[in-house]
């Protein structure tokens, strides 16, 4: 496994509608493993193949909390090939960021609950119901495979906010 470089928001691959995965082979499985390692190294919740420069409809997402509407365990990694959101309900505003645009967030609207379908790593069709952060992550990563970035949901790019770097314990206010 390897940590792959994450492409930045200005990379054209992030604006392409990614190609469908037609078969699960050794190269796809290696890409999945590398994407999981990359997501963990970047402290991400999810990652889409276009974010590592590969125009394929493939996402990995990690469940961090108990998912009340589904059967997933905290810490479980979900791999979806050719993911689609087939059902949404509710709406809320959330501050969202992206590994391809580090240091920025924007307040956007997302569905509270989603049902997503796709193929798992073995090529079997799966459907997952999700809410909260997991639902947000699915929407964010499916947007990526469709060439959409989170800030496209903002009325204006001017509404992006720069995050302040965290101070280390004992670090003074003045430089």
Image (cartoon, rainbow, N blue to C red):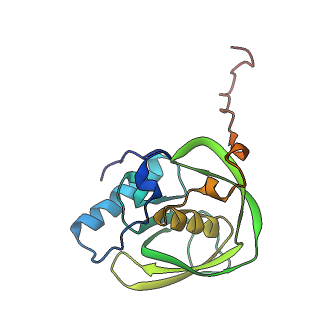
Q: Where does residue 93 sit, x and y in percent of width and height?
A: 76, 61
Q: Is residue 68 above or below residue 156?
A: below
Q: Residue at x 59, y 62 (%)?
A: 64
Q: Position of residue 81 (x, y in %)?
A: 40, 74
Between 62 and 99, the one nearer to me in the picture: 99
* Residue at 77% across, 66% down: 92
Number of dots carrying numbers: 0
Which residue appears at 56% of the width and 68% of the height? 138
Q: Position of residue 50 (x, y in %)?
A: 41, 57
Is 124 situated above or below 130?
Answer: below
Up the image or down, 10 lies above or below 141; here it is above
Location of residue 17 in the rendering, given as x and y in whole percent from the top left corner:
43, 66
Going by the image, does 65 lie left or right of 148?
Answer: right
Q: Nearer the viewer, residue 70 or 147?
A: 147
Q: Going by the picture, which residue comes out furthest to the left?
A: 26
Task: Name the foreground residue: 122 vs 55.
Answer: 55
Q: Is residue 159 left or right of residue 53?
A: right
The outermost residue toward the top is: 175
Q: Split into 4 quadrants, where in the image is the C terminus?
A: top right
The foreground one among 130 and 21 is: 21
Residue drawn at x 54%, y 65% as measured from the top left: 143
């Amino acid at each position: 496994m390897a940590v792959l470089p994450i492409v930045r928001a200005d990379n054209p691959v992030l604006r392409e509608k990614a190609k469908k995965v037609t078969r699960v082979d050794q190269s796809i499985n290696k890409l999945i493993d590398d994407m999981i390692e990359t997501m963990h190294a970047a402290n991400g919740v999810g990652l889409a193949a276009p974010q590592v420069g590969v125009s394929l409809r493939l996402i990995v997402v990690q469940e961090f909390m108990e998912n009340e509407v589904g059967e997933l365990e905290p810490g479980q990694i979900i791999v979806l090939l050719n993911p689609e959101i087939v059902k949404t309900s509710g709406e809320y505003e959330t501050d969202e960021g992206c590994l391809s645009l580090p240091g920025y967030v924007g307040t956007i609207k997302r569905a509270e609950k989603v049902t997503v379908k796709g193929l798992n790593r073995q090529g079997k069709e799966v459907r997952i119901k999700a809410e909260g952060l997991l639902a947000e992550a699915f929407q964010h990563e499916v947007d990526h495979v469709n060439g959409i970035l989170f800030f496209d949901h903002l009325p204006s790019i001017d509404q992006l906010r720069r995050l302040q770097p965290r101070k280390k314990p004992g670090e003074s206010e003045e430089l």
